Amino acid sequence: MARAVSIGLLSMATIAGLAPAAQAAEPGDIVQALHHIPGLTVVKEDPAPAGFRFFELTFTQPADHRHPDKGTFQQRFTLLHRDFSAPTVAFTSGYNVSLTPNRSEPTQIVNGNQLSMEYRYFLPSRPDPENWSQQLTIWQAAADEHRAVQAFKAIYPGKWLATGGSKGGMTATYFRRFFPNDVDGTIPYVAPNEVVQNGSYNRFLAKVGDDPACRDNLKALQRDALRRRDELGAIAAKDIAKNGYTFDIVGSADKSLEISVIDSYFAFWQYQKQADCATVPKVGAPADQVYAWFEKVDSLNGYSDQGLVPFIPYYYQAAVQLNAPEAYDGYLRDLLRYPGADAPRTFVPKSVQVPPFQPFAMADIDWWVKTQGSQFLFVYGGNDPWGAEPFVPSRHDSSRYVVAGGNHGARIAQLPADQAATATATVRRWAGLPATPAAPQLRPNTTGFPLFDADLSLIGQPKL
């Protein structure tokens, strides 16, 4: 990884030269303006709420930014356009791009445009031929975002912000690390900072929440499920037959079941709330009831090939650069048939060669954020396990907020009123707008957009 990082650092200046030299378009029709951006294709325009226009786009990117002569691929974007003079928010989930018009919280705060980007290697945004080790790195993805932002600045010359939730928050952070001058502020939501496996996640999980009885009940249910794996496995088999699930990647349905049971404790605190402790089935509850609870929290068939294939690029990166939490399973060891299987490499097909882990990738990001990063506003949920090892922002116009009792959907609107107002004013200042006393509100909106959680694009996806 030392070589990969050094390449990224040396290439910051040259990568700008790879960005398309888009001709500035006079403000007018957005379609005409988009056609002025070299390499951009308007796939279609979809309906959008009043006052906005929404486009599906593709953008030609080098498969390898270090060697732009070695082929290209089409990266899928969407654009929510409001006004050429409005601030623009670069958003990514770190996974696939949503093809439904929606506004991230920063986009709502600044009432801006939103350019949403699909992460490379998430289909269909994948080079052909594939070269995972050279093309799927945090630097290559940051270079994708850099070229896109630079290209779109030709039609959106105002202030720019970057944001994303979970892996998208990580992506926004890494983008800022390698290209610190591209945007005027970065707002990562619930972004893990997995520098090293040092037990931080397990220490967090051992004390998460305000009710020790809830933690005990969850652990008791896990042990009960593993003791009754044949009974639960029979129910799972019906779903497998009905849906045509296969388990070639992890090896068997039983292995998927065991890993899901291990993950269920983490997943409960990731997406559920403290009040949901009351829904945890008691030991010995009917198998159908227990199975239904797992379907809500962490499906026992969640590691089927069909469930894994869309997210293989994440698991690959977790195994090579991003790192991942250690399994919280010490109290289950006597019941495990596949100890050590709950790790990213398990979820990558054997057809994809996984290089050794590169420990300096996250160490570099962590050091830069806490010493040199500026204009960062991190938001975490107090009960979200992914915040067990959070980013520590520098003192350079940066801050970190924690939603008390919040989960993986934590956002500015859930903070106490004074903190929400301060955070909102900061985001608006970075966008070149006057501060307003009103912070975002947690209420049904009447704008025609769906309600947007920090991890909107991640709901129903495995773990991160």
Image: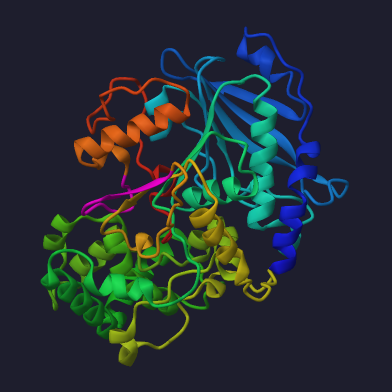
Prevalent SS, magenta region: loop
Of residue 60 and residue 198, the one placed in the foreground of this image is 198
Q: What residue appears at the point 41 percent right and 18 percent down from the top-left corner?
A: 49
Residue 453 is situated, as x and y percent measured from the top left of the image, at: 35, 41
Report if residue 275 is visible in the image.
yes
Of residue 291 and residue 376, the one placed in the foreground of this image is 376
Residue 461 is situated, as x and y percent measured from the top left of the image, at: 43, 55
Residue 407 sits inside the magenta stretch: yes
Quadrant in which the C terminus is drawn: bottom left
- The answer to whether 122 appears left or right of 400 in the picture is right
Q: What residue appears at the point 74 percent right and 50 percent down from the top-left corner?
A: 127
Q: In this rendering, is residue 44 above or below 454?
A: above
Displayed quadrant of residue 423: top left
Q: Residue furthest bottom?
A: 334
Displayed quadrant of residue 384: bottom left
Residue 102 sits inside the magenta stretch: no
Instruction: Give the image's coloring scheme.
Output: rainbow
Of residue 304 and residue 142, the one placed in the foreground of this image is 142
Residue 197 is situated, as x and y percent measured from the top left of the image, at: 46, 75
- The answer to whether 379 appears left or right of 185 in the picture is left
Q: What residue appears at the point 24 percent right and 62 percent down from the top-left corner?
A: 292
Residue 63 is situated, as x and y percent measured from the top left of the image, at: 77, 49
Please give the range of residues in magenta: 398-410
Q: In this rendering, is residue 275 above or below 21?
A: below
Quadrant in which the N terminus is drawn: bottom right
Of residue 372 and residue 101, the one placed in the foreground of this image is 372
